[in-house]
Amino acid sequence: MEGYAYEYSHDSSMDSITFSDTEYPRNSYENKNPKERGISKDKLIKNTIVDHVLTQESEFDIDDNLLYSDDEYDEDYDDPYMNSSFIEPISTIKERKGLSKGSVPNLKYECLTTQNIFENMLAKVHHLQPIFNIPPEDILILLQHYDWNEERLLEVWTDRMDDLLIEIGINPSSGNISSSINGNGQMRSISDIIENKNSYCNNQTETNKDENEEYQIPNTRTRDISFKNNFFCTICCEEKSTETFSLECNHEYCISCYRHYIEDKLYTGNIINCMGCTLALKNDDIDKIMGHPSSTKLMLSSIKSFVSKHNRNYKWCPFADCNCIIHLKDTSSLPEYSRLHYSPFVKCINLHKFCFTCGFEIHAPADCIITNEWVKKARVESENLNWVLSHTKECPKCSVNIEKDGGCNHMVCSSCKYEFCWICEGDWAPHGNSFYQCTLYKNDDNNNNNNNSTNTNSITDVNKSLKKYTFYYKMFNEHEVSAKLDWKLGQNVGNKVKELQEKLGISWIEGQFLTDSIRMLNEGRTALKWSFAVAFYSDASHNLTKIFIDNQSLLSKAVEDLSELLQIKDPEIIMKRKTDFYNKTGYVENRTFALMECGRDLLCKGICKAN
Amino acid sequence: MASLPKRIIKETERLVSDPVPGITATPHEDNLRYFQVTIEGPAGSPYENGIFDLELYLPDEYPMEAPKVRFLTKIYHPNIDRLGRICLDILKTNWSPALQIRTVLLSIQALLASPNPNDPLANDVAEDWIKNEQGAKNKAREWTELYAHKKN
């Protein structure tokens, strides 16, 4: 945890921001506890914005403490960027924490799996057992029936427990009993007690005793598998010597029909009843019939339907093959956040980040409405833009087909060695030393008229707007593709760190700056990507939009610089340029936050709105 | 044709040998899973004296899956829509493999005797039924007269 300070040196590549020691004493990064460090970072970011970007205060008056959202979660989990045996030093996480990514401040949530939820339910059962005094698996069925809603179950339970037990099929109703008359007699006595309502408490202890006795009588005689010769099953209508199963109701069916029946029902999440009446099969029965523990499938599918029903508080992680469920305990503040154009970004234990409201990836600076609108538009227009989606471009000089397989936008044609910019396909020379402008949409009709002979001279408004969209979509797509490639790069960074360790004897912790850089690169790219959606829907003539676009350019440049840096393969050079890594990563972080806040400002002020 | 499960054969045999009063079900000769069904309107209901045509199909998964039943005769009933689809719990969520073609058809006959406008499938009919029960019943009688076969 100790030992690496953020050294924000004065670097010529960092155009607009320099971090002077007087303003942000280095101490605060070095030896404070992580939380404090994070705060000072916040201040730093805030000040940066105020100084350099907006000089507006209104929306940035967030209490520093509020910027910590998901403390508990960040620390405990591994990072896919590194080998699982590694644990990320807390300090780096906290450092990033300052960057609240346009996310809802103080969002309290937990990440669960169906298994976790089921365990919680089992704990509930355990908790209810002394009250109900019936076998745990019966409580499980009751809970399942009441959608795992403890309160509702308790309410009904106190009102009419005997009816409930029959209704849900835990106890046989008097009608279809033939063998367990004993149990039935007891049930009646319970109902008598409740009807009379005198000295309820006294009687209840009796009742409990009764019930205990009832359930201590082994049920195996009435509900179990038995082997019958020449058994006629009324379901398949076959007569055979087979194993059969029946509950207390004596509805006996052959085991293969029962298996077939249960197999289908395991995935519906509903209580499974006897095929002939309403008596419920308990988990034990199911496992017995199926011959292997299948009831967990039923329980999990029941939990799944529970999650789907309670989709205000529970959301599935939208990433493929991820089984996490995010549970937001208190959704009451969500409308307020959306009013402020914050998005409730959450992170599952597999470190998939997504927006709790709309289920998309982190889409700041765009809010959910812009995101939705953009994605819808992309879907509608994608046919027009299929060509944009192709990942290859021709070298502007020799026309050889080039596929960008990672790295920055500074391309060198492997064939003719021409250096060009991947975005604008122009010569790279002016990009290197001057301000990076390629993210700017130029409304240059004249130019295009001259260049593009296929276009008619009269460009209609529709055409223009399509062109504008095409431009932004192209930008969006570029960054998406790049982000994917960076992700791949991220997968290998663990090895890179290892290489540093092995070849140069660098400690693992010291090598973590690489991991951080990659992560920041990714976050920067994502923000950049979505910023084009915001830019598309913003009033271009407004001054704030111009500021936003400037911010975009700054982040774009920052990301490109970092990306270029990460292309370095030689471990020695990497270590030599370690300070650069720190600086550029920190810079990307600041620019990302600035862009997000600026985007939020656009949304709050109504300059950016979906149609 | 794939061999017919014993269960279907048995049920079909029993439908023929021991028919339910007021109900007929005849398997199609080309497809023994497809039944042509007639149900007599229950006495005392607006459907009295009418004979209604239905079709019934036993899906591959039968009896684990409910049979598919549909009215072919136009009928004015809150739980039966214009296409003849029937809103009946045992045909959907409450299906149990222990139920049979015969019990399903009996249930449909019972549904004719006691319409349930509070759980409607044909909303307009149900509304009519709730607002003006007598009028609705008269209309059902008219439709029976118009569209159903006559009972001799």
Image: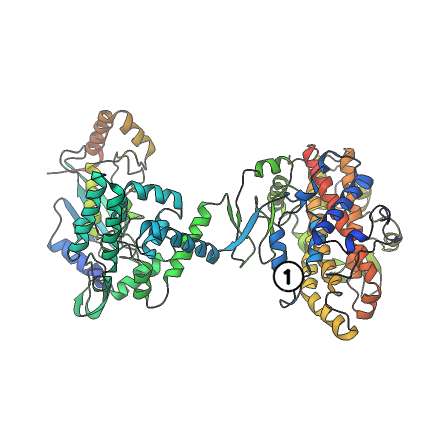
Name the image quarter holding residue A390. Answer: bottom right
Kindly give the residue lying farthest to the bottom in the view shown. Answer: A503
The location of residue B80, given as percent across then percent down, is 28, 38
Instruction: Give the number of marks.
Output: 1
Q: Is residue A5 visible?
A: yes
Residue A364 located left or right of residue A309: right
User: What amino acid is labelled 1 in the image?
Assistant: Asp
Which image quadrant: the C terminus of chain A?
A: top right
Mark 1 Cα-neighbour bin, 10 Å: few <14, some 14–19, many ≥20: some
Residue A474 lies left or right of residue B147; in this view the side is: right
Question: Is any atom of residue B69 visible in this view?
Answer: no
Q: Is residue A5 left or right of residue A532?
A: right
Residue occupying image coordinates x 71% and y 53%: A34
Circle 1 marks a residue in which chain?
Answer: A
Q: Nearer the viewer, residue A608 or B54?
A: A608
Residue bearing mark 1: A79
Q: Give the colouring mode of the picture.
A: rainbow
Q: Which x, y percent locates residue A411?
A: 80, 59
B18 or A204, which is in the foreground? A204
- Above or below for A558 versus A339: below
Rendered position, A470 above or below A221: above
A280 or B105: nearer the viewer:
A280
The percent coordinates of residue B106 (x first, y second) are 18, 45
The N terminus of chain A appears in which quarter of the rendering? bottom right
Left or right: B1, with A367 as reference point = left
- Looking at the rendered structure, the secondary structure element under dot 1 is loop
Tell me residue A307's x, y (percent): 46, 49
Taking the spot 80% from the left edge, 59% from the top edge, the residue there is A581
